[in-house]
Amino acid sequence: MKYKILFVVFAVFSLLSICFTSTAQNPVIPPHTYQILKVNLHAHTTYSDGTYTPAQLVNIYKDAGYDVLAITDHSTVAGYGEAYSEGTNIGLTVIRGEEVTCSWSDGSPKHVVALFINQSVGISGNSNVEIPVIFDAIHAQGGIGIVAHAWSSWSNWQIYTNEPWIDGWEIDYSMAWVLESGSIYVLNHDFHNETWLPVIRSYWTYLLAENRTEAGVRDALMERRIVIYGNGTLYGSSYALSLYAQNQDGLKIPSPTPTVPPSTVSPSQTPTPSSTQTSTQTHAPTSTALPTSHNMTATPTTTPTSNILPPEAIYAIATVAIAIILVSIATVLLLRKRGNLCAYCFASFKPFVDV
């Protein structure tokens, strides 16, 4: 009798192992839901060369439908307190930042947007400090460094395109290579004055975030859940566009079909700057972001999955292991007792056949 019980137990575990192995191979994983935040991470106030106070600027972006704004005055974070207070009152997330403002030896701007810092990076506006020193100072505060309008001095920036300590780049159409480079990419306004008022309603950056907090914004940037919008078109990595397509139902406004410009420019090539933007107060915003003439339909890819086995797979493996142990024990016992496994199996099933 004990051998029959062992045989039945083995059969049950074998069936369970087949079922759970099938489930593990074809798991049903629901898509992750993110909030799509409309953001600008580069703006100036009266604390540097902007013409609006921090509170005024926060209200301007709130009225334009933005969820997040970074205050990034030149070489100071003094405007953050006022902006943060106003943002808290009206429901706009404000990020503390600074535009580290230096110059290249040829006099062209060497600007880096520092985000999520605690205080000013402390580098003089006229300093010819080396690029690694700037990013080291930002990272020392736990901040993120984004190269600002690199196309305005591309001959100097082009040798840094593969540096891992550069967190990200502001982009225009000449910087399309960044989209699939693995770096952070943002389409910022560099807001200064009333000239930018129509611009902030024509292009922006979307972040797919867990929430609207500062931590949620940072996480979305670090995980590259970034899609940018310009000229009625969306741009981004295939991964980010896929996530956007899964989550766009939560938007309050209709969304265009996800498209992305071809990566016709590689980091090893020198793209032609699209703007002559300089660091002076009189410079104007670019009227276009990423021209639609560069579009191509993007094929969304599957969201990257974790390397950790799901619970179903772990259970299936354990079940199979137990089944193997049981059948091994049963086989040994049967062979010792009967000497002929085939005859025993036939004898076990014979009552069922006779009925």
Image (cartoon, rainbow, N blue to C red):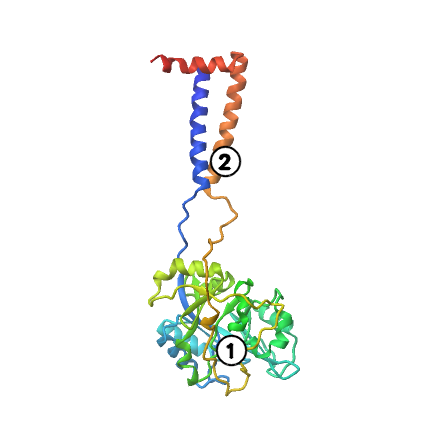
Residue 125 lies left or right of residue 306; in this view the side is: right
294, above or below 306, in the image: below
Viewer-nearest residue: 41 or 88: 41
Percent across and percent down for residue 211 are: 41, 62
Point 38% across, 79% down: residue? 60
297, above or below 26, in the image: below
Viewer-nearest residue: 232 or 342: 232
Q: Which residue is mark 1?
A: 77
Foreground mark, 1 or 2, reads 2
Q: Is residue 295 visible?
A: yes
219, above or below 98, in the image: above
Residue 212 falls in which quadrant of the image? bottom left
**Amino acid under label 2?**
Ile
Q: Which residue is mark 2?
A: 317
Image quadrant occupied by the C terminus: top left
Percent across and percent down for residue 291 are: 46, 73
Q: Are marks 1 and 2 in contact (CB under 8 Å)?
A: no
**Amino acid under label 1?**
Val
Label 2 secondary element:
helix
Label 1 secondary element:
loop
Residue 175 falls in which quadrant of the image? bottom right
Residue 279 falls in which quadrant of the image? bottom right
Q: Is residue 227 visible?
A: no
